DNA sequence: GTCTCGCATGGGA
DNA sequence: ATCCCATGCGAGA
């Protein structure tokens, strides 16, 4: 790509009298910016200038200066504070001197602050961990749990650090582990994949900003090119260039699409958690977070059901060349017609127009697509006139479908390898083995909203990218385990749409919010003793009973090494100090203060001065409650299982 | 009769 | 109301 293009997504100019160096890219080097954009970046005004309308703005907790969180261009200007919130670099540096040290907090819950500007490689977490006396494993585990549950508390680079350094856990496994929390972390496994070299152009961070912060959960070690504007140096145009620019005049830019797509991806961790009930079933299951399409250039924005839910492992499998840039394009759950004998795969119109070459003739063109085994298939990419529109199909897919032993309900994925623009296809089997379950599952899967936004799909089996299958190609044994259904059943394993279990995205969002609110109130059941399970040399408390709702309390550590819990009386609103392990009912008053007989009536004044109280409330606002946090996590599986049951029952 | 191809239909988003 | 797309269906080989 010989033409320089400004990596400011809202600029993208190719002409400037002087090119400037922007933010450092993960792949090395720096973003290329035109003079104006580069000047703004140099003056630390980039986000103020170009992203003022973007989401992701927060205020420095200390000086209230506006900070654009999650944006690569502001990466150096802010830090995540230990107990939540953000601070501008200067404030954070000064406040760090006073921050609570890791060893002051039980369970090794320590400072998680790290300068965002710090390179991922430069501050290995091991050194941080080793520098204190905490149980390293416990901290590592906790950090992973916290990270999975509260992604916003960690900067992506920190997450990457956590992954990369603490035993090479990857986010996929973290989500996986969270999904299994309800069963006592039974499936927490160490992946064998090391860090790889997939690169996401850092300018994408600015495009995705908050979305990137969240979605990074799904792309931890293998960052990908998502939402990349066509024409950046990181992306080769589609072969022939037919796709580039098509419909551009009519369509929102990928930047805009990214903005529009954000609400769909608010909190992947929560999404992942939602899937726990399903994912508890199989150790091979992975939670999938739908990613906004990389370059939506279609006339219409791609429906979330087509967003690639491809995992990093799958990408790695697809690539084979770690220096390649894998661009997940879209995916489609095979319909009965698709998987049938006709050999025609109906392509979503928007996807076909966005990612496949432009065709003007109905006969279309031969399109070569490589599968995961490296075999190259040639399909006829064509369309049928249909109601003044077009219906795009891939013809001749039967051999390929049969080769991959796909059936209705399975998912076929399309990606692109850059540079080169080679199209690759992968697939994901639906999990259910028996037909009845298949029906039910497929019914859920087939509804785009149900499978997508809620991550209810239990795609635990991954045909070609099982965690234990890193060698590339299809694991023959695994494939053998999939019994090819009869043709008759193949075309009948999806119920009519009217019978499909439906969970609208709004419902899912509602559920997430409900969960988010509820999690603050979760407590382990007081009458139940936990079972201590040891996994990977780490001990976890496992409860057989789902959590109960308790009164919200505040934990703080006003003096080194001393954790305190505070609760507010529901009658007099006075704050009372409690033991850290005290569990309160939803409604609690001073009269129930069994731990401090001198303050068990409302008429007695508070222990804290108003100033202390103010500080307490202020600090606790962004602070994680470390004690009950694990308890919450340990019960999320059961809690969500119950919740989902309720939702499914009401939806059905 | 069977299969393929191309278009039409209609439910659902 | 419009568009998408799963699938039905008829014509022709």
Image (spheres, coloured by chain):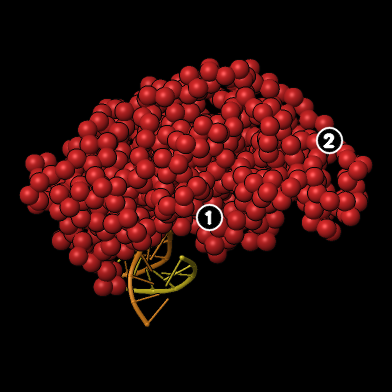
Chain colours: A red, B yellow, C orange
Chain of the residue displaying label 1 = A
The quadrant in which the C terminus of chain A is found is: bottom right
Q: Is residue A298 left or right of residue A94?
A: left
The residue lying at 50 percent from left, 37 percent from top is: A95
Disc 1 designates what residue?
A450
Q: State whether residue A287 appears in this view.
A: no
Mark 2 = which residue? A528
Q: Which residue is depicted at the point 37% across and 35% down?
A: A117
Residue A223 vs A457, above or below: the answer is: above
- In whole angstroms, how far apart are the C-alphas of marks 1 and 2? 35 Å
State the residue at coordinates (77%, 27%): A531
Q: Secondary structure at mark 2?
A: loop
Q: Quadrant of residue A124?
A: top left
User: On the image, which quarter does residue A400 sit in?
Assistant: top left
x and y, in percent, of residue A156 in the image: 43, 38
Which tag, 1 or 2, sits closer to the chain's start? Answer: 1
């Amino acid at each position: 790509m010989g033409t320089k293009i400004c990596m400011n997504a809202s600029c993208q100019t190719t002409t400037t009298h002087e090119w400037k160096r922007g933010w450092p890219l993960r792949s090395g080097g720096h973003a290329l910016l035109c003079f104006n954009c580069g000047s703004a970046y140099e003056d630390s005004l980039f986000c103020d200038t170009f992203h003022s309308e973007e989401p992701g703005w927060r205020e420095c907790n200390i000086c209230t200066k506006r900070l654009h969180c999650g944006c690569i261009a502001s990466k150096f200007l802010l830090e995540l504070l230990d107990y939540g919130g953000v601070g501008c670099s200067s404030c954070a540096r000064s406040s760090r001197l006073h921050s609570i040290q890791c060893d002051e907090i039980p369970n090794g819950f320590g400072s998680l602050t790290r300068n965002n500007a710090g390179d991922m490689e430069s501050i290995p977490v091991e050194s941080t961990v080793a520098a204190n006396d905490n149980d390293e494993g416990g901290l590592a585990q906790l950090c992973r749990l916290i990270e999975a549950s509260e992604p916003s508390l960690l900067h992506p680079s920190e997450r990457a650090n956590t992954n990369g350094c603490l035993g090479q856990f990857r986010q996929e496994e973290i989500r996986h582990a969270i999904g299994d929390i309800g069963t006592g972390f039974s499936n927490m496994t160490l992946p064998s994949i090391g860090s790889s070299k997939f690169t996401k152009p850092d300018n994408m961070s600015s495009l995705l900003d908050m979305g990137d912060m969240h979605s990074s959960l799904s792309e931890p070690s293998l960052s990908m090119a998502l939402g990349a504007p066509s024409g950046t140096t990181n992306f080769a145009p589609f072969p022939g260039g037919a796709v580039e620019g098509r419909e551009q005049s009519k369509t929102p830019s990928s930047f805009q699409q990214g903005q529009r797509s954000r609400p769909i991806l608010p909190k992947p961790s929560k999404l992942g958690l939602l899937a726990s009930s399903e994912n508890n079933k199989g150790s091979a299951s992975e939670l999938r977070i739908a990613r906004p399409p990389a370059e939506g250039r279609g006339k219409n924005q791609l429906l979330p059901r087509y967003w690639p839910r491809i995992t990093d492992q799958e990408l790695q499998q697809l690539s084979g060349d770690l220096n390649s840039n894998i661009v997940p394009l879209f995916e489609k759950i095979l319909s009965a017609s698709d998987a049938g004998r006709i050999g025609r795969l109906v392509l979503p119109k928007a996807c076909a127009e966005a990612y496949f070459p432009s065709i003007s003739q109905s006969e279309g063109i031969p399109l070569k697509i490589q599968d995961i085994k490296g075999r190259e298939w040639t399909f006829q990419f064509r369309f049928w006139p249909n109601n003044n529109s077009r219906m795009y199909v891939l013809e001749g897919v039967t051999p390929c479908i049969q080769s991959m032993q796909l059936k209705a309900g399975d998912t076929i994925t399309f990606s692109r390898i850059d540079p080169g623009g080679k199209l690759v296809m992968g697939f994901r089997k639906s999990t259910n083995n028996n037909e009845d379950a298949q029906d039910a599952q497929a019914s859920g899967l087939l509804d785009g909203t149900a499978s997508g936004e809620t991550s209810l799909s239990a795609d635990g089996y991954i045909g070609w990218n099982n965690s234990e299958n890193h060698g590339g190609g299809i694991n023959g044994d695994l494939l053998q385990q999939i019994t090819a259904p009869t043709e008759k059943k193949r075309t009948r394993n999806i119920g009519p749409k009217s019978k499909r279990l439906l969970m609208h995205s709004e419902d899912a969002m509602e559920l997430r919010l409900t969960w988010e609110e509820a999690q603050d109130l979760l407590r382990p059941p007081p009458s139940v003793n936990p079972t201590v399970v040891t996994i990977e040399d780490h001990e976890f408390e496992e409860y057989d009973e789902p959590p109960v709702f308790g009164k919200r309390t505040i934990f703080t550590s006003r003096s080194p090494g001393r954790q305190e819990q505070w609760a507010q009386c529901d009658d007099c609103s006075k704050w009372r100090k409690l033991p850290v392990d005290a569990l309160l009912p939803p409604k609690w008053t001073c009269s129930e203060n069994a731990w401090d007989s001198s303050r068990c009536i409302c008429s007695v004044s508070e222990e804290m001065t108003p100033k202390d109280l103010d500080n307490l409330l202020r600090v606790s606002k962004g602070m994680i409650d470390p004690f009950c946090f694990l308890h919450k996590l340990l019960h999320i599986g059961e809690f969500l299982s119950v919740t989902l049951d309720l939702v499914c029952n009401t939806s059905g």
